[in-house]
Image (cartoon, rainbow, N blue to C red):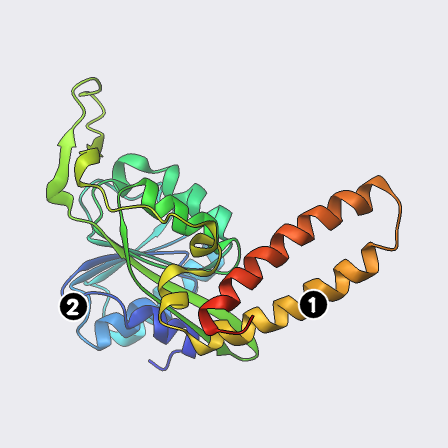
Amino acid sequence: MQLSKRLQAVADLVTVGNRVADIGCDHAYTSIYLMENHIASHIIAMDINKGPLERANENIEKTGFKDRIETRLSDGAAKLKEDEVDTILIAGMGGSLMVKILSDSESVVSMVNEFILQPQSEIFLVRKYLHEIGCDIQYETMFIDEGKYYVVIKATRDTKNMIANPSDEEDKKRHYDPKRLPKKYDKEVHYLYGKLLLENKNRILEEFLEKEYHTTSNILNHLTEKETEHAKERVEELKQKLQYIIEGMNYYDKM
């Protein structure tokens, strides 16, 4: 199975031997690739739409992995059960939707120790959510595929740190001992653009920040000429955004 650069970047981060939930699997290309290359031990490919899932089933049957890739019609992770998978993989969704999918299935997500996520937008929300549920963001990459910028995140946590919540035994939810949680980022710019990307001076992020700086500056210059209340509010928002962009560019000695 030949994957796009984007999906290849996602698949490359899955830990060998893990059981994987491919949420929003579309035609199951990533799931099939993970099996063909002996990366995943078992996969649950899930999608909210019947059409793509039917195509996924056809592709899975053609490649002979019907016994190792099962499909489920599911709104997000709703049809996933506790302790069925080690890795949750989600690619090609907006950040807010991604966070909603994961937070709506809290008891299932709490038992997962690896997250491979490729949010299309609002990436800062995903980074913050991962820290909130006790994950350590281990790796990030940023690249261009067919003219678009993409970020892929790998986050993990040690599920052995989980303890039962004594006040809520019936639903078997888990939580982490706060003393053993990974440290959250201490700067907002790290959530906005990725601490690891900034510290490693990712060149694609550098290019992205330079474009954002020029675009935001031009819009700001245009809006400062207007006197409406909406324009004034927008100016303040853009000034704050520009400050974060400059803070990010400082990692590259650009400002």
Q: Position of residue 50 (x, y in %)?
A: 46, 54
Q: Please tell me which residue lies in front, 192 or 246.
A: 246
Q: Which mark is residue 28?
A: none
Picture residue at 16% right of the left edge, 20% below the top: 166
**Looking at the picture, does residue 178 appear above or below residue 230?**
above
Q: Please tell me which residue lies in front, 3 or 118.
A: 118
* Dot 2 alpha-carbon crowd within 10 angstroms: few under 14, some 14 to 19, many 20 or more: few
Q: Please tell me which residue lies in front, 132 or 201.
A: 201
Q: Please tell me which residue lies in front, 5 or 203.
A: 203
**Looking at the picture, does residue 254 appear above or below residue 92?**
below
Element under label 2? loop
Mark 1: amino acid = Thr
Picture residue at 46% right of the left edge, 49% below the top: 188
Q: Position of residue 206 (x, y in %)?
A: 50, 74
Residue 146 figure quarter: bottom right
Q: Which residue is mark 1?
A: 215
Res. 28 visible in picture: no
Q: Which residue is mark 2?
A: 16
* Dot 1 alpha-carbon crowd within 10 angstroms: few under 14, some 14 to 19, many 20 or more: few
Instruction: From the image, state whether disc 1 or disc 2 is nearer to you.
Output: 1
**In this rendering, position of residue 33 left or right of residue 121:** left
Mark 2: amino acid = Val
Picture residue at 43% right of the left edge, 73% below the top: 6
Which quadrant does the C terminus fall into? Answer: bottom right
**In this rendering, position of residue 222 left or right of residue 123:** right
Cα distance in 3D space between marks 1 and 2: 42 Å
Q: Position of residue 181 (x, y in %)?
A: 22, 42
Q: Position of residue 137 (x, y in %)?
A: 30, 56
Mark 1 or mark 2: whose residue is earlier in sequence: 2
Residue 70 figure quarter: bottom left
Res. 235 visible in picture: yes
